[in-house]
Amino acid sequence: MKVAVTGASGLIGSALVPALRTSGHEVVRLVRRAARAADEVSWDPEAGTVDLAGLAGTDAVVHLAGAGVGDKRWTAAYKETILRSRVDGTRTVVRAVTQLDPAPRVLLSGSAVGYYGDRGEEVLLEGAARGDGFLADVVEAWEAETAPAAAAGIRTVCLRTGLVMAPGGGAFGRLLPILKAGVGGPIGDGRMWWPWITLVDEVRAIEFLLDADVSGPVNLGSPEPARNVDVTKAVARALGRPAVVPVPGVALKVVLGEFADDVTSSQRMVPRVLLDAGFDFVHADLDHAARWLAEQ
């Protein structure tokens, strides 16, 4: 299968590309500059352009590009960057795939657990209503841009990814150094649900969805979401460190600003569609996942 990938240098994309190649797929990476290698295709999401010739014969597109929500403090300007990078990027990809003849069979488009907002103890399956807040607004607009692809007959999946457990980025990339130093702990009271998934299972799930008879939103998270306090303790235990120093919510607000509200939100997300489709997790339980993370 020929698979085109945006966001190939990001946390998920940089693990996905070699995994796809190991499985025997031909991978082309969309880059925001002139192509310099045979496996590169130039695109400019702000201008809305893609080198269509480079995408000829593509069977599937995995669209992961977007500005990192936790990379910078949420000023009004950066919030606009977060929104536009997702909306403009997805619109550009969808316009390109619907112009190809033949069109790709499948589009897997990035999305996020932020769609659900802060939901307390509610179990969140794919059919749950959207929540409130900036990220919920972003995800709704982001996913809406995939509609023309689905209307054109391309099987379209929105990857509602939770907190990716990986040493090199995201929430866990920040958490690990603190826990290794023995000075970390739960956030606030630690009662919020964290929809974690290891990078291994994130990549495996994306590859699984290339062929699975699934469309629409798909939750990418462990079948056993856990409370923040339990996640923190499990990772610290795997590292052989204590996790007794809580991070006050007010301190998080000072450091992260508005983004702190989303870090402390509770999302008890369950990957029902993925499980029903027959996907088997390598790291289904928290202790196993924490041990894997500590070994990286």
Image (cartoon, rainbow, N blue to C red):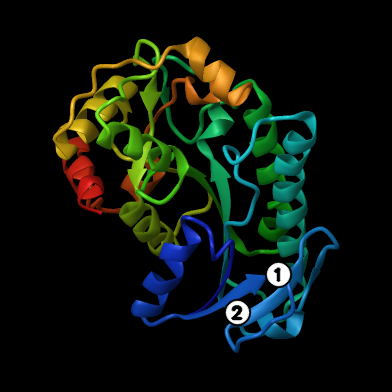
Q: Quadrant of residue 149?
A: bottom right
Q: Nearer the viewer, residue 10 or 100?
A: 10
Residue at 47% from the left image edge and 55% from the top image edge? 11
Which class describes the residues within 10 Å of circle 1: few (<14), some (14-19), or many (20+)? many
Say if mark 1 contacts mark 2, CB within 8 Å: yes
Q: Judge from the rendering whether residue 180 lies leftward or rightward of residue 266; answer left or right.
A: left
Residue at 78% from the left image edge and 64% from the top image edge? 95
Q: Quadrant of residue 226?
A: top left
The disc placed on residue 97 is 1
Question: Where 95 sits versus 270, above or below?
Answer: below
Three-letter amino acid code of the residue under disc 2: Thr
Which residue is identified by label 2? 58
- Residue 224 visible: no
Q: Nearer the viewer, residue 202 or 2?
A: 202
Residue 60, image x, y percentages = 55, 71
Residue 29, image x, y percentages = 59, 74
Which class describes the residues within 10 Å of circle 2: few (<14), some (14-19), or many (20+)? many
